[in-house]
Image (cartoon, grey):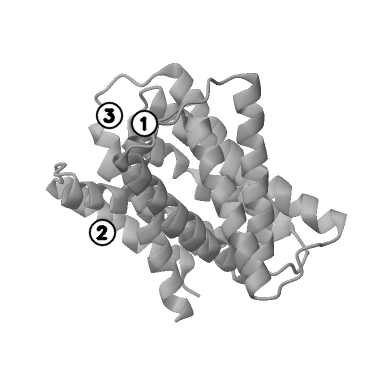
Amino acid sequence: MIKVFPFIFILLWSSAFITTKPIIDNSDPFSALAFRFALVALGFFLFSIYSKKKIIVDRKNFFESFFSGVLFHGVYLGGVFFSISKGMPTGIAALIVTLQPILTNALSGPILNEKVSLKQWIGVLLGFSGAVMVLGFDIGDKIPTIGLVATIVALIAITTSTIWQKKLSNNLPLSVSNMNQALGGFVFHIVIIILFAEPYIDFSTTFLIAMSHQIFLVSFGAFTILMFLIKRNSASKTVSIFFLIPPTSALMAWLFLNENLSNLDLLGFLIATIGVYIATRD
C-alpha cells in the first residue's frame, strides 16, 4: 500500500493547480487560504480528539510544526496563489516551483548530511528536462514581474519547509503535527490580510466546489501523504516526485479543461517519469 502513496500524492497535488484559478476568481488569495486552513486545522483537531491523540504538546514541538506550516501553507501557497492572481500562468508557476528538487538535493547534503548520488542527480536533471518540455515551450504570455517574484519566494519557502520538516526530531502524531501546521498557515494569512490585503470571498458554487476539493483531497489527503513520505524517506528522494506534477497537471488540463496536449508534451511526460524513477529507486 505504501508504494502507491507517491502516485496518489502526485494525482491529488497536481489537481490542486486545476482548482486554484476558480478559487482566486472568486476571492482574494489570502482570504481564501485563511478560510481553507481554518477549516483544515479544525478538521485535524477533531480527528486528533476522535483518535485520542495528545493535543497539548511541549513548546518546542509546537513551534517547530507551527513554523513549518508558516513556510509551507503560508509563504509557499500564499506565493503561488498571489502570483496566479496577478496574472502568472498556472503552468509556469508550477514549472518554477518544480525547481524545488534541485535546490533540495543541493542543500540536503550539507544540512541533513544526506548523500545525493550521481544517479539521483541524473534523475533530477531528466525530471526537470521533461517538465520543461511539457510547459517551458508554452511560454507565450507576458509574465508579470511581481508574479515571478512571488513564485520564486514560494519556491524558496517549499524547499526550506521540506528540509526543515525532515530535520525535525519530534515524534508528534501526524494529525497533531498537521493541525499545528495548518494553524501556522492560518495565522500567517490572517496577518497578511490585516497588514496588506482587502478580504473578499464570494461563496459561489464554483468557489465552494473548488475549495472543498483543496481542503479534503489536497490538505487532508495529499499533504498528509507528503508529510509521511518526508518522515519515511530522504528529503532528496521524496521531492523528486514533484517533477511529475507539472506534466500531470497538463494532462489533467487536457482531460478536464480541453487544453491542448502535443506529442512534445507526451515525450516530456515520459522523460520526467523516467527521471523520477531513476532518482527515487533504491
Point 61% across, 55% down: residue: 42
Q: CA distance from mark 1 to mark 2?
A: 35 Å
Asked if residue 17 is positioned above or below residue 148 in the image, the reply reads below
* 57 to the left or right of 244: right
Which quadrant of the view contains residue 96?
top left
Of marks 1 and 2, the one in the foreground: 1
Q: Position of residue 253 (x, y in %)?
A: 23, 46
* 175 to the left or right of 150: right
Point 44% across, 58% down: residue: 216
Tell me which label, 3 or 2, sits earlier in the chain: 3
* 114 to the left or right of 17: right
> Can residue 231 be seen at all in this image of the molecule?
no
Describe the element under mark 3 as helix, strand or loop.
Answer: loop
Point 38% across, 67% down: residue: 7
Viewport quadrant of the N terminus: bottom left
Describe the element under mark 1 as helix, strand or loop.
Answer: loop
Q: Position of residue 206 (x, y in %)?
A: 30, 41
Of marks 3 and 1, the one in the foreground: 1
Residue type at mark 3: give it. Answer: Ile
Asked if residue 69 is positioned above or below residue 53 in the image, the reply reads above
Q: Position of residue 242 (x, y in %)?
A: 44, 54
Circle 3 is placed at which residue position? 139
Of marks 3 and 2, the one in the foreground: 3
* 264 to the left or right of 101: left
Tell me which label, 1 or 2, sits earlier in the chain: 1
Which quadrant of the view contains residue 234?
bottom right
Residue type at mark 2: give it. Answer: Leu
Circle 2 is placed at which residue position? 270
- Packing grade of label 2 (10 A; few <14, some 14-19, many >=20) is some
- Packing grade of label 3 (10 A; few <14, some 14-19, many >=20) is few
Point 51% across, 65% down: residue: 225
